[in-house]
Image (spheres, grey):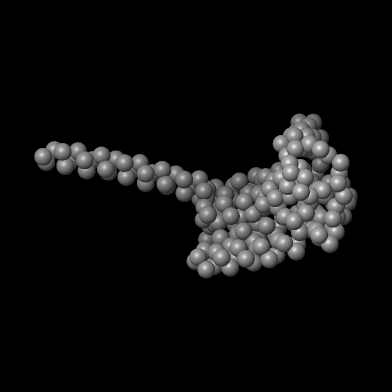
Amino acid sequence: MWPWEHAIVAYLAYSVLCHTVYRDSPSGLEAIAVVFASVFPDLVDKSLAWEFGVFDAGYALGHSIFAAVPVSIAIGLVARSAGRSRVGIAFGLGYLLHLPADVIDAYVREGIFQPELLLWPVVVLPDPGSTQGFVDQFLLFFSRYRDELLAGDLTMYRWIQIGLAACTALLWIYDGAPVLRELLCGCRRLLLGTVGSERSLDDSTGRR
């Protein structure tokens, strides 16, 4: 599953959780946490495997259920101690959804059921034999993905993904566009603060 597909699924799930449990929308920090966590396993494993050769394949420590669970719990405890419990929940949800999503994606697209993707170091996947770096490997896979989309002959599974993306975009707008909302508010405060400072300076100069 592609990084943006993981991000879409994770944000959708966390937003639904927020509306169901908290009767609220995700904050900008929570949105960042859930999206970052949703791609965290790939950032770890793909980089270490493709670029540095630490792992044989792009499914290792980051995708391991034996690492994901304790890391999610640890992040949750740290977030709770900082008074940001929901940020910890967002991270844990994004991270833990990534793992079964990869297994389901491989099964639906290729008909291969691979729970061993999540069992490192109990099960170590073999070296695929690629010697390309991270960027080259990414571009290779992306070119195949692009060609599939441009061909126009999309599978039902791909149409479902596109539908999920559209629904998530609408939900993000309904949530008030978190992250973008905070950025715009920050820029507005900065602008108002700058204008206010200039006015105060002009007033003090005029009084003199």
On the image, the x and y values in percent for residue 73 come to 64, 66
Q: Residue at x 87, y 50 (%)?
A: 126
- The quarter of the picture where the C terminus appears is top left
On the image, the x and y values in percent for residue 57 come to 81, 48
Give the camera-side residue of 159 and 46.
Answer: 46
Left or right: residue 64 compared with residue 94: right
Give the camera-side residue of 31 and 207.
Answer: 207
Q: Residue at x 31, y 41 (%)?
A: 194
Looking at the image, is 51 positioned above or below residue 22?
above
Left or right: residue 132 compared with residue 170: right
- Whether residue 139 is visible here, answered yes or no, is yes
The quadrant in which residue 77 appears is bottom right
Looking at the image, is 127 positioned above or below residue 139?
below
Q: Residue at x 41, y 43 (%)?
A: 187
The residue lying furthest to the left in this view is 208
The quadrant in which residue 123 appears is bottom right
On the image, the x and y values in percent for residue 112 come to 88, 51
Give the camera-side residue of 159 and 177.
Answer: 177
Q: Residue at x 87, y 55 (%)?
A: 113
* Figure label count: 0
On the image, the x and y values in percent for residue 167 come to 64, 48
Left or right: residue 4 compared with residue 55: left
- Whether residue 22 is visible here, answered yes or no, is no
